[in-house]
């Protein structure tokens, strides 16, 4: 296990951060606009987000680099700005973190499907190498490969990220199948653990897709077959559309009340995904502090 990870988990569960996209939208990002472009055009507004998470009790904050890969950015005409977008994203979170909090850089999916031959493995590897290289040069504490639905794409990203020498978290989206325990491509928690362990990740996780109660059995199944730390970032329940707006009905208090069960199931790193914000992280930190 990487030394930083051992240090982080030595005192118990680690609090990560919450959603970024919705927080940036609160600051003026329009629907369909490119969030990562704000690293260059509105860095001071982006920086407000990680600052709020640090103040709420996050011990790890991520970066506004989730979609800062060639395939996503080409849609916005910024395919030649990958290094600048990623470096700026890291610098923003590092300023917010100061010496209080670790910064793990976010790498999301390409938006292309290997199964449908929309992209080749070689092209994916080059895209992830470009992003991970820029992130590493900017000086982060770790890399989080998150919201992955295709285990094969995740493995390509993992192999690239491992080459940086940084700790690597790899997190899949579960919620498919009748028991909500499979990825979109049909992988089970056990299959994900097996593949990610072979690939040499430092932390295995799940994020997005469903609410915290549904994460508990997924986490428990992962824990039953691995000693690696587990990273869990559930949504604030399932979204509903009300008056044309996406609404999440799980409150910060409801979310926090389920945290002890998630810790009991084996979670070492706990935060939130869609629908969560600083108020959720504050409640999580308070709950974890009492465990």
Image (spheres, helix red, strand yellow):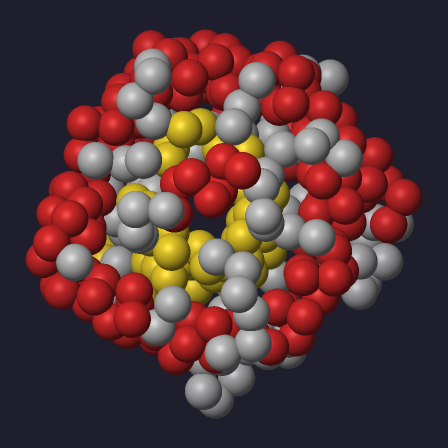
Q: Please identify the quarter of the rendering in which residue 255 is found.
A: bottom left
Position of residue 228 measured from the top left corner of the image (x, y, whole percent): 54, 60
Location of residue 148 with respect to 36 vertically, above or below: below
* Residue visible at 42% across and 71% down in the picture: 219
Position of residue 125 measured from the top left corner of the image (x, y, whole percent): 82, 41
The residue nearer to you, when weighing 161 against 78, is 161
On the rendered image, what quadrant is the C terminus found in? bottom left
* Residue visible at 48% across and 13% down in the picture: 91
Position of residue 87 measured from the top left corner of the image (x, y, whole percent): 58, 15
* Residue visible at 35% across and 73% down in the picture: 265
Q: Please identify the quarter of the rendering in which residue 74 is found.
A: top right
Left or right: where does residue 240 sit relative to residue 33? left
| Residue 137 seen by the camera | yes
Q: How many marks?
A: 0
Location of residue 42 with respect to 232 vertically, above or below: above
Location of residue 1 with respect to 37 vertically, above or below: below
Q: Please identify the quarter of the rendering in which residue 213 is found.
A: bottom left
Left or right: where does residue 281 sit relative to residue 169? left
Left or right: where does residue 70 sit relative to residue 34? right
């Amino acid at each position: 296990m990487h030394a930083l990870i051992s240090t982080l988990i030595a005192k118990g569960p680690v609090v990560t951060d919450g959603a970024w996209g919705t927080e940036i939208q609160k600051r003026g990002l329009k629907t369909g606009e490119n969030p990562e472009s704000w690293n260059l055009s509105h860095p001071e507004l982006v920086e407000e987000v990680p600052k709020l998470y640090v103040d709420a009790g996050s011990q790890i904050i991520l970066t506004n680099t989730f979609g800062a890969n060639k395939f996503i950015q080409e849609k916005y005409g910024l395919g030649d700005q990958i290094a600048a977008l990623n470096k700026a994203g890291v610098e923003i979170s590092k300023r917010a973190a100061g010496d209080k909090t670790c910064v793990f850089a976010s790498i999301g999916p390409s938006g292309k499907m290997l199964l449908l031959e929309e992209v080749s493995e070689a092209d994916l590897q080059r895209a992830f190498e470009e992003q991970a290289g820029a992130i590493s040069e900017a000086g982060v504490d770790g890399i989080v490969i998150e919201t992955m639905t295709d285990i094969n794409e995740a493995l390509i990203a993992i192999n690239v990220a491992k080459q940086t020498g940084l700790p690597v978290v790899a997190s899949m989206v579960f919620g498919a199948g009748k028991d909500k325990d499979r990825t979109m491509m049909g992988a089970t928690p056990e299959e994900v653990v097996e593949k990610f362990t072979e690939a040499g990740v430092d932390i295995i996780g799940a994020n997005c897709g469903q609410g915290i109660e549904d994460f508990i059995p997924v986490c428990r199944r992962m824990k039953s077959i691995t000693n690696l730390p587990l990273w869990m970032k559930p949504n604030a329940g399932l979204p509903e559309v009300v008056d044309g707006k996406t609404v999440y009905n799980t409150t910060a208090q409801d979310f926090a009340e389920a945290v002890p069960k998630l810790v009991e199931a084996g979670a070492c790193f706990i935060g939130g995904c869609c629908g969560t914000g600083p108020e959720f992280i504050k409640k999580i930190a308070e709950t974890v502090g009492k465990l």
